[in-house]
Amino acid sequence: MAHLHQLDPVHRTNDPQASQPTSATERTSISEQDIGEYREQDRFLPIANVSRIMKAAVPPSTKIGKDAKELVQECVSEFISFITSEAAERSLTEKRKTIGGEDILCAMGNLGFDNYAEVLRIYLSKLRESSSINARAEHYIEPRMERE
């Protein structure tokens, strides 16, 4: 990613006359290319996370090339955007502002990812069950024994 310049467009000094730029060359500018590259990287999952997941799926002696990691990074990020966009349409038609787990599962089914949706439905159920158990455990305060 190209280096992004500071956002403040004016270089400041202690000289009051120098506090106002006199030409465009005195301003720090961000090029359209910098903005495009920033936006692209902003919408991708971190490459380190993608790499860690990829490495877990192959034998330890297997090496994964940078281009393979970047390609998978772009693919999974696009997949997430695709599913989320479909889920957002569902929540909008139901006049809701929040996308929930059920919206994601429905979107996956609508887009033909039924096999994945079923596995995730089970995961979501277990996640909710675990969350409710943890919430109940937080309300329970175990009595403490006083030391003598």
Image (tube, grey):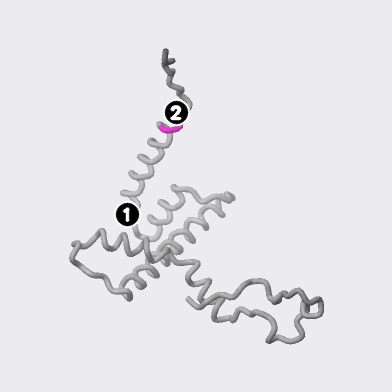
Identify the residue under disc 1: 116
Identify the residue under disc 2: 136
**Residue 41 left/right relative to 117:** right
Q: Is-magenta flag for residue 137? A: yes
Q: Position of residue 20 (x, y in %)?
A: 78, 79
Instruction: Report the label total.
Output: 2
Of pointers 1 and 2, the one earlier in the residue sequence = 1
Nearer the viewer's eye, disc 1 or disc 2?
A: 2
Q: Is residue 10 above or below residue 86?
A: below
Pick the residue in front: 147 or 65. 147
Which residue shows up at 70% across the image and 83% down it?
26
- The image's mark for residue 89 is none
Q: CA distance from mark 1 to mark 2?
A: 30 Å
Q: Position of residue 124 (x, y in %)?
A: 38, 44
Which residue shows up at 35% across the image and 60% down it?
112
Specify the quadrant of the image occupied by residue 22.
Answer: bottom right
Badge 2, how many Cα within 10 Å: few under 14, some, many 20+? few
What secondary structure characterizes most of the magenta part? helix
Which residue shows up at 34% across the image and 69% down it?
72
Q: Position of residue 97 (x, y in %)?
A: 58, 51
Pick the residue in front: 58 or 128. 58
Q: Is-magenta flag for residue 81? A: no
Pick the residue in front: 55 or 97. 55
Q: Position of residue 52 (x, y in %)?
A: 32, 60
Mark 1 falls on what kind of element? helix
- Amino acid type of the residue that numbered disc 2 sits on in the rendered structure: Arg
**Residue 98 left/right relative to 76:** right
Mark 2 falls on what kind of element? helix
Q: Is residue 118 above or below residue 145?
A: below
- Amino acid type of the residue that numbered disc 1 sits on in the rendered structure: Tyr
Give the magenta range: 134-138
